[in-house]
Structure formats: C-alpha cells, structure tokens
C-alpha cells in the first residue's frame, strides 16, 4: 500500500543522532539489555510507546498560554470538564497526573483482596494496580485473539460466554467490576465492537456489576467501529463515540494517548454521584485538589483541545493509515505481523520469528533487542517479561503469544522514517537463526520490565556486558 498523506505541516524539528551498530551494542550492554533503560539520544526510531510521545498541534500549543493556574476552581478545569462532558458524555470527572494515577485512584476504591476483575485483556499497569491490592486480574479474550494470522474485524472483544460462566459460577460473588480496554492493547491493539460492549454491559448489569472502560484509545476504536461494524459506516465519529461509551458506568483515560497530550489522565463517571465522590476523595489524597488533579492548568487545557481534535476525520484517517502502512512494509520485509494491524501499533509474533528461543529465555525480549541492534529501533516486549510472575507461585507467567509492539507516536514520524523499522526487521530476519535468548538476573516485584537487567545467552554479547560492568 502507499503511505498516507500527512494532513499537517511540520513547524519544528528535532535532530536525530545516527548511531553505528557498535555504539548500539555498547549502549544496550550498559542498559542491562533493557531498551527501557536506554538513553533516548541513543535511539534513532523510538516506537517504544505512543503514550505521551505525540506532537501537539498549534491549537494545543496556543492553549498552553491561557492555562489558569489557580489552585481551586480554575477556568482550565472548567474547560477540561466541559470537553469530557461534550465528547465522552460523562458529567463527573476526577483528573490525575496520568493514566496510572487514575488507575490508582479508581482501584483503590473498588478492589479488596481476593476480588476478581475480568477484562478482554489487562495491560501492564492495570494488572499491577489490581494485583498489588490483592486482586486477581483475569483475561477473557475471544478465541480469535489467540490466532495471530486470523483476519477478524474485532479480535479485541471479550469472551462473553466466559464472562457469564464466571459470574454464574462459584467465583461470581468475588467479581468486583467488569472491564474492557478499547482498543485492546495487550491483545495486539485490536478494536472492540459496539455489539460486544453492549453484550458485556448487559451481562454485567444482570449480575449487579459495574462496567468500566479503559478508553485511552477511544478515537481509534470508534474509527474501526465505523469502518467495520454494520450500520455505522455513515455515522459521524462523535456519535459513534457517544454510543460506544454510553453502556459504561465509568471510564479510565490516559490523556497521553487519544487526547494527544504529553501528560494527564482522568476517571469519568456517569450518573452515580455517590461513586464519583468516593473517587474524588481518594483523588484529593494522591493526586491533589479536585480541580487540578496533579496537573498544571495549561495541561488541562491541552487535554480539552486534544479530546476534540482527535476526532477530526483527516487526522484519524492518516493515523490509522500510517500504522497500516507500517504493518504492510513490515510484512513485505518478511515479518510475522499480527493480523489485522491494530490502531496504534504493529505487533510482531516473536514466537514465530524466533521459534528456536524457548519462552523461558524470553523470545520477544530477544527480538526487541535485535531490532535495536540492527537498526536503532526501540520497540516494546509484550510477552513473558511484561507478564511478570504469578503472585501466588512466584513462577514466570507465559502469555499465549510472545509479541513485540512497534507503537507509532502521533504526528511525529514521517512514513519514510517508519521504513527504517522495515530495514531493521529485514536485517534481524537475515540473522534470526543466530539470535539467542536472555537470562533475567535482576527484577523488581512489580512492573519488572521497566527496570529489569539481563545477560545475553549469546557469548559475544555477554562479553560486552562484562566490559560494560552491567552484571
């Protein structure tokens, strides 16, 4: 496919330092073979995350200048609250410094030890917030989600039959809330259908449970609903969003994704004002006064602009198209790409790419390191390292798929720059049989992938670790 045309002009540029393979080997060895620990100056194409890494528009930059930094009752908060009401349809909102701050406020109010939170698939920080409170984060993806080659329109859906079985079974009373993440980040960036959202909401309601949506990428999910779900092809995107979110009792949002802001998040609540006040009280303790929530007023204004801007059709057509273009050129380079391509990222099937690396040696981690060494491309492992250890047994958890995510920052890279990722994949595939796994030598008890340190099982690379003093 052809690259999509960018619906914007570039007004400011940042130089990128080009590196040699030898320099990248040294940098990664010093980082303990963890791409999260690399200096950004050592990365040429940074596809680690789309969270907070987007380029703001001229309207967002202008909004910074009208930020009201009053401690209480700022005009910036009023504009932010109005945007949440107008775009998302929720009357009550608790701002937070970012998405995991919102999760901390929310789960602190709804989770007790031993309670279960089912979801289509929990991502890393959500799972961590549930588990550190003694809860159980249960994934209930549809069977189609586990086949990376299958072309299905809504592989992010929840297994409704599995949810009914859980709620009707002996553990049903232990279910605290029901969650859906749209799009499904842990499941390949796949969208969730409106029909599935409504079915899950109906089941939750029948069993007296609240439905909570993680809507970090709500605009991208709405785009896929309009493109793929019968009856919505001519529906304006703002209407799709309102219908998509209407079944939810509350939503969690990282504004660093589909509000195209560099910081910020929130919890928004529907008509349950008592529940809102419970969350607001917790927010005061951890995030700050209810009208700033750990954010400067100018950041609230940026989010307000971004929530509206993200639904502009030229932007979303380009956004989805650029990620699809990346998927097509990676496939042409020979990569095993999870199909169909998701909304914010392309996911590589590391298990298929490196079948000789056992899961105990972290094949997705090995692939992410190889991409960096081959072409200066930083990507994120979505596999056994991120999955962490079972809280009860202490054993490593091995998810059904070992994936590497190449997440595209919004309005940052040109399509020509993304072709560097295809070059890195081609170079990695050319030497794939020689790629070896890793031994995990240092880890934190929670969210270990951010700070863990490794030793390569490749002897030559292991010698670099010794030289760098990283072990």
Image (cartoon, rainbow, N blue to C red):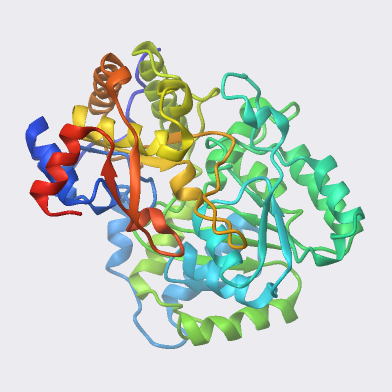
Residue 303 is at least partly visible in this image: yes
Instruction: Return the residue nearer the eye: 241 or 161.
Output: 161
Above or below 217: residue 101: below
**Residue 157 lies in quadrant:** top right
Instruction: Return the residue nearer the eye: 79 or 101.
Output: 101
Tell me where residue 290 appears, x and y as whole percent: 51, 82
**Residue 210 lies in quadrant:** bottom right
- Left or right of 180 in this view: 391: left
- The quadrant of the image that shows the N terminus is top left
Residue at the spot x=40%, y=24% of the render? 354
Instruction: Return the residue nearer the eye: 276 or 450.
Output: 450
Q: How many marks?
A: 0
- The quadrant of the image that shows the C terminus is bottom left
Above or below 298: residue 190: above
Above or below 309: residue 334: above
Residue at the spot x=84%, y=52% of the render? 166
Residue at the spot x=20%, y=33% of the render? 459
Tell me where residue 178 appears, x and y as whole percent: 74, 57
Residue at the spot x=27%, y=31% of the render? 370
Instruction: Return the residue nearer the eye: 217 or 441.
Output: 441
Tell me where residue 444 appears, x and y as whole percent: 39, 63
Tell me where residue 335 appears, x and y as whole percent: 39, 18
């Amino acid at each position: 496919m052809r690259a999509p045309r960018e619906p914007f002009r570039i007004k400011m540029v940042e130089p990128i330092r080009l590196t040699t393979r030898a320099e990248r080997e040294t940098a990664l060895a010093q980082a303990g073979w963890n791409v999260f620990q690399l200096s950004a100056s050592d990365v040429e194409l940074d596809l680690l995350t789309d969270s907070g890494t987007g380029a703001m528009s001229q309207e967002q930059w202008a909004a910074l200048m009208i930020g009201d930094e009053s401690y209480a009752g700022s005009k910036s908060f009023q504009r932010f609250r109005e945007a949440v009401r107008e775009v998302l349809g929720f009357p009550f909102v608790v701002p937070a410094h970012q998405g995991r701050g919102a999760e901390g406020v929310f789960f602190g109010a709804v989770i007790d030890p031993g309670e279960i939170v089912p979801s289509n698939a929990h991502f890393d920080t959500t799972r961590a917030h549930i588990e550190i409170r003694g809860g159980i984060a249960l994934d209930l993806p549809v069977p189609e989600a586990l086949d990376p080659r299958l072309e299905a329109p809504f592989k992010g859906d929840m297994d409704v039959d599995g949810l009914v079985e859980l709620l009707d079974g002996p553990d049903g009373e232990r279910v605290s809330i029901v969650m859906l993440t749209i799009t499904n980040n842990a499941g390949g960036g796949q969208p969730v259908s409106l029909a599935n959202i409504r079915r899950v909401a109906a089941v939750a309601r029948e069993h007296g449970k609240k439905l909570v949506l993680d809507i970090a990428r709500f605009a991208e999910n709405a785009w896929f609903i309009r493109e793929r779900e019968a009856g919505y092809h001519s529906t304006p995107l703002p209407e799709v969003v309102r219908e998509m979110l209407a079944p939810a009792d509350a939503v969690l949002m990282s504004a660093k994704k589909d509000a195209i802001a560099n910081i910020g998040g929130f919890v928004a609540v529907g008509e349950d004002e008592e529940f809102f006040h419970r969350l607001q009280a917790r927010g005061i303790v951890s995030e700050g006064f209810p009208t700033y929530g750990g954010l400067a007023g100018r950041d609230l204004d940026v989010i307000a602009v971004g929530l509206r801007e993200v639904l502009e059709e030229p932007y979303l057509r380009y956004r989805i198209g650029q990620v699809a273009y990346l998927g097509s050129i990676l496939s042409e380079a020979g990569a095993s790409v999870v199909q169909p391509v998701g909304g914010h990222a392309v996911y590589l099937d590391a298990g298929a790419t490196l079948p000789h690396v056992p899961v105990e040696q972290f094949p997705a981690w090995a692939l992410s390191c190889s991409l960096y060494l081959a072409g200066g491309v930083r990507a994120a492992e979505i596999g056994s390292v991120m999955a962490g250890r079972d809280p009860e047994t202490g054993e490593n958890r091995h998810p059904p798929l070992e994936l590497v995510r190449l997440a595209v920052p919004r309005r940052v890279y040109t399509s020509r720059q993304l072709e560097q990722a295809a070059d890195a994949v081609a170079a990695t595939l050319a030497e794939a049989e020689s790629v070896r796994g890793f031994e995990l030598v240092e880890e934190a008890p929670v969210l270990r992938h951010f700070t863990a340190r490794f030793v390569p099982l490749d002897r030559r690379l292991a010698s670099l670790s010794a030289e760098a003093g990283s072990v």
